[in-house]
Amino acid sequence: LAKTTQPISMDSYEGQEVNITCSHNNIATNDYITWYQQFPSQGPRFIIQGYKTKVTNEVASLFIPADRKSSTLSLPRVSLSDTAVYYCLVGGQIYNQGGKLIFGQGTELSVKP
Amino acid sequence: DGGITQSPKYLFRKEGQNVTLSCEQNLNHDAMYWYRQDPGQGLRLIYYSQIVNDFQKGDIAEGYSVSREKKESFPLTVTSAQKNPTAFYLCASKGHTQGVEKLFFGSGTQLSVL
């Protein structure tokens, strides 16, 4: 199972771009990289997923280098409401099947006015 | 309205008591998960099930038990053997939507010891 390592915490200011990097040195060939956001006393919610290169959606971008041993979540122009914990999860993309999915410690992002 | 429903939202356990946390989903997902979260910590996997009538231990299964008799339901029992049960418990199912395979989480159950 791929173990993930992220910074414990990050600080930013409103309007700035935030980049959170996750290391996953033993990622397997069929593993995808998924990022989740969690607010206090709530379940995590999906942000973005990728396999390689760059993926962009309406809320974030995900950059994955060719060796796939790390990934970077990019949040453009953060606001106070982006203050949350962000988790990187590495696991197999088997259609509608499970498998052991282990979360890391996550990165606590604090956005200041 | 599809999703994951956890109940109750708050639960109190007395010394030596077993309690059961409910998790129901109407998303038609095969895989379901239980995680435990302590204050300021990440999510730790308790049990997971990839299909009905089958489940596997996660990293912290001791003191917990589960069943998966129906696709829609994956209840978690916190037994008296779990000496430090106070935590936030999250249930999730895994499924495919809009080209992405991802976890869908419930709103959680906060368990406290009286």
Image: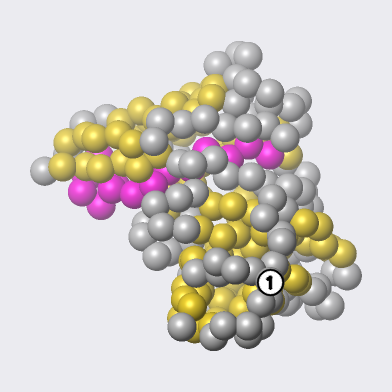
- Amino acid carrying label 1: it is Ala
Q: Nearer the viewer, residue A84 or B47?
A: B47
Write down the residue under mark 1.
Answer: B81
Chain containing the residue with disc 1: B
Residue visible at 49% across and 42% down? A105
The secondary structure type at the circle numbered 1 is loop
Residue visible at 25% across and 52% down? A81
Q: Is residue B109 placed above or below A47 in the rendered structure?
A: below
Q: x and y percent of residue B50 in the render? A: 80, 58
Q: Nearer the viewer, residue B71 or B37?
A: B37
Tell me where residue B76 sits by quadrant: bottom right
Left or right: where does residue B34 sit relative to residue B111?
right
Q: Which residues are magenta?
A: A78-91
Residue visible at 55% across and 16% down? A65
Badge 1: few (under 14), some or many (20 or more) residues near its Cα, within 10 Å? few
Q: Is residue B32 placed above or below B58 in the rendered structure?
A: below
Q: x and y percent of residue B56 in the render? A: 81, 57
Q: Is residue A45 placed above or below B107 in the rendered structure?
A: above
- Residue A87 lies in the magenta-colored region: yes
Left or right: where does residue B14 sit relative to residue B17?
left
Q: x and y percent of residue A109 in the render? A: 31, 41
Q: Nearer the viewer, residue B3 or A4?
A: A4
Q: x and y percent of residue B38 in the render? A: 47, 58
Colouring scheme, one of rainbow, by chain, secondary structure, one colour: secondary structure
